[in-house]
């Protein structure tokens, strides 16, 4: 009897929790592939997509993060909630992980024959039809890497394409939300599945603040805290990001012809209100780095510097130059981008690279918590002088 009762209770609990799980949003869903760039770019895009889904009042399907491993030609998809908690996002808007959506909702509201991919305009691909080359005018959502591997992770094939131009993702100006609703009412279009993120890079200014709902998952947080407790002295520390790999050297060459390269609006402002990008901002030399750190060390009782880098951590050079200040200089070993980001987020002061979207992640997180940050070689000395002169008059 007791056994049966337990079974009934168990089944009830199960069905209640399932009933909760399978609730369909009558306003529909936004789904997309984070198909451009690595983590920093994908995080910018994510905030855009979150703002967009909110503006359209559709549930956002949380896509896995797309990762590239040197040993593999195909991208790897890491579930969204491996790195971030889902709950805090729900405080802002309705969301569901892509795994859950595909398992529990797709079979009924988005069966294989209804899967249309959305793109602004056609992504031409050349099909080889019986020896004849022919241009395909659809979205070709699965063409190339990571496009194919991403949708394949969920066994998704598309039966058609929908070009949505001239609609756009900016839901903060004009009445974009109403226009999307009119053209794609949710009863006819329950899922808008985008070939790329419905958001801009760098993140639109109005969506920056949404970062406050993006919270590291418990394992990432725990790993970051464990490093801080075990490896750093029990005192305030500075976190720094040194972006200096080969791809970055190449990217920085574009500084002279680009006023606001990549994530530069995070320090220069979206309209270059605070100056122009300089090569030193993109690739600060040792003197700039040491000088910046020495100034910070004068201002507070820091005892260590945590260095995150994609290439050269400069541990020895930094330790030598800061010997007089008795500063411990450490990196995470083995390196791990997400744990390093979390540690940088927890530092007492953060110095980052204004051009980098990897830095931008940390800057936004810290802004949302009211923590201080600065950038290498910013403000540019000339700009700083000019603004001082300005102040004097
Ligand atoms: P951006 O290129 O600097 O704008 O940032 P992205 O995230 O788009 O691409 C850079 C990638 O390089 C990151 O996603 C990381 O995989 C790697 N990377 C950059 N900086 C660091 C770092 O400080 N530590 C680690 N572990 N990896 C980094
Ligand atoms: Mn990048």
Image (cartoon, rainbow, N blue to C red):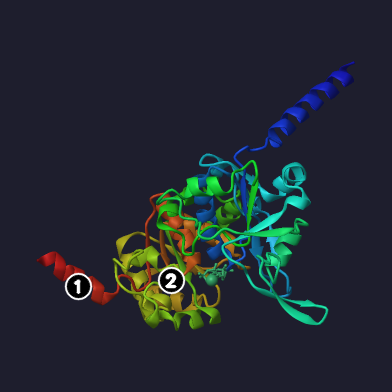
> In the figure, 373 relative to 13: above or below?
below
Report the front residue among 180 and 385: 180
> In the figure, 350 relative to 124: above or below?
above
Residue 258, which numbered label?
none
Is 277 left, or right, of 4 in this rendering? left
Report the front residue among 346 and 13: 13
- Within the displayed image, which quadrant is ligand 2 positioned in? bottom right
Is 224 left, or right, of 326 in this rendering? right
Residue 272 position, x and y percent, is 32, 68
Q: Which residue is mark 1?
A: 386
> The residue tagged with tag 1: helix, strand or loop?
helix
Residue 38 position, x and y percent, is 58, 67
Report the front residue among 381 and 211: 211
Is the residue indicated by label 2 positioned so its CB lies within 8 Å of ligand 1? yes
Q: CA distance from mark 1 to mark 2?
A: 22 Å
Q: Is residue 245 visible?
A: no
Quadrant (top left, top right, bottom left, bottom right) of the N terminus = top right
Residue 158 position, x and y percent, is 73, 59
Is 152 left, or right, of 124 in this rendering? right
Is 149 left, or right, of 177 in this rendering? right
Badge 1 vs badge 2, beta-carbon distance below 8 Å: no
> In the figure, 116 relative to 268: above or below?
above
Q: Residues within 10 Å of mark 1 (few under 14, many from 20)?
A: few
> In the figure, 336 relative to 110: above or below?
below
Q: Which residue is mark 2?
A: 355
């Amino acid at each position: 009897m007791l056994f049966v009762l337990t079974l009934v209770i168990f089944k009830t609990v199960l069905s209640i929790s399932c009933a909760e799980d399978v609730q369909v949003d009558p306003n529909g869903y936004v789904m997309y592939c984070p198909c451009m760039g690595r983590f920093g770019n994908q995080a910018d895009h994510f905030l855009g997509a979150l703002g967009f889904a909110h503006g359209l009042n559709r549930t956002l399907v949380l896509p896995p993060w797309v990762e590239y491993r040197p040993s593999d030609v195909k991208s790897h998809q890491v579930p969204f909630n491996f790195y971030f908690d889902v709950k805090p996002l729900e405080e802002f808007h309705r969301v569901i992980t892509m795994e859950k959506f595909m398992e529990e909702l797709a079979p009924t509201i988005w069966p294989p024959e209804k899967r249309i991919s959305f793109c602004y305009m056609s992504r031409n691909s050349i099909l080889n039809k019986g020896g004849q080359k022919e241009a395909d005018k659809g979205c070709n959502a699965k063409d190339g890497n990571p496009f194919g591997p991403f949708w394949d992770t969920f066994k998704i094939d598309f039966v058609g394409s929908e070009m949505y131009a001239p609609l756009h993702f900016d839901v903060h100006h004009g009445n974009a939300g109403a226009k999307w609703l009119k053209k794609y009412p949710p009863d006819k279009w329950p899922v808008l599945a985008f070939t790329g993120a419905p958001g801009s890079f760098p993140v639109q200014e109005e969506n920056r603040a949404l970062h406050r709902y993006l919270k590291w998952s418990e394992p990432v947080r725990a790993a970051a805290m464990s490093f801080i407790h075990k490896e750093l002295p029990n005192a305030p520390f500075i976190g720094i990001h040194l972006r200096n790999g080969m791809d970055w050297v190449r990217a920085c060459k574009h500084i002279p012809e680009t006023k606001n390269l990549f994530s530069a609006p995070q320090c220069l402002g979206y309209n270059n209100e605070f100056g122009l990008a300089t090569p030193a901002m993109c690739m600060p030399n040792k003197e700039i780095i040491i000088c910046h750190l020495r100034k910070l060390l004068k201002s507070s009782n820091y005892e260590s510097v945590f260095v995150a880098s994609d290439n050269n951590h400069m541990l020895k050079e930094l330790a030598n130059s800061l010997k007089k200040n008795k500063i411990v200089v450490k990196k995470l070993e083995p390196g791990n981008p997400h744990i390093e980001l979390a540690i940088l987020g927890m530092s007492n002061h953060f110095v980052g690279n204004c051009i980098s979207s990897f830095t931008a992640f940390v800057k936004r997180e810290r802004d949302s918590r009211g923590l201080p940050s600065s950038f290498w070689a910013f403000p540019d000395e000339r700009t700083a002088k000019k603004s001082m002169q300005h102040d004097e008059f």
